[in-house]
Image (spheres, grey):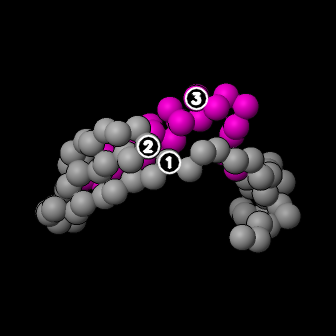
Amino acid sequence: MAHSPRTSDRTIDNPTFLVRILFCQHSSWQGEIQWLDGRETQRFRSALELLHLIDDAVTRSQARGADQELRHWTTSERKNSS
């Protein structure tokens, strides 16, 4: 996978999820997400809540490997996107 030279590359263990969309009401998804590595299942009531659960799992995975971090945008790239 090729990366842009403008990003800083850092890696984490890739958490794996199984997402089941059970309903689509009020312009959002409802269902359940299973975090396969963490062996947990949680129901979600909106797409935003789904993203929050994924973010929480990534943060917890990152805490396990404290020396590993996510990629982030460089400061100069933020200025160029304006």
- Residue 12 inside the magenta-drawn segment: no
The residue at 20%/55% (across/down) is 31
Q: Is residue 17 left or right of residue 12?
A: left
Position of 79 with respect to 35 (left or right) is right
Q: Mark yes or no: residue 35 visible.
A: yes
Q: Is residue 1 above or below residue 17?
A: below
Q: Is residue 67 left or right of residue 29?
A: right
Q: Could you tell which of marks 1 and 3 lies nearer the N-terminus?
A: 1
The numbered disc on residue 68 is: none
Q: Residues within 10 Å of mark 1 (few under 14, many from 20)?
A: some
Tell whether label 2 touches label 1 (CB within 8 Å): yes
**Residue that carries the numbered disc 1 in the rendered image:** 15
* 66 vs 36: above or below: above
Main SS, magenta region, reads helix
Tell me the quarter of the picture where residue 70 sits.
top right
The residue that mark 2 highlights is: 37
Q: Which residues are magenta?
A: 46-71
Residue located beneath label 3 in the image: 64
Q: Disc 1 on helix, strand or loop?
A: loop
**What's under tag 1, amino acid-wise?**
Pro
Q: Residues within 10 Å of mark 2 (few under 14, many from 20)?
A: few
Question: Where in the figure is residue 32, as x and y percent of width and height?
Answer: 23, 51
Q: Secondary structure at mark 3?
A: helix
Q: Residue at x 50, y 32 (%)?
A: 60
Q: Are marks 2 and 3 in contact (CB under 8 Å)?
A: no
What's the CA distance linking mark 1 and mark 3? 12 Å
State which tag comes first along the sequence, 1 or 2.
Answer: 1
Q: Provide residue 51's location: percent of width, then percent of height.
A: 39, 50
Element under disc 2 = loop
* Residue at 22% from the left image edge and 62% from the top image edge: 21
Label 2 amino acid? Answer: Asp
Residue 35 occupies quadrant: top left
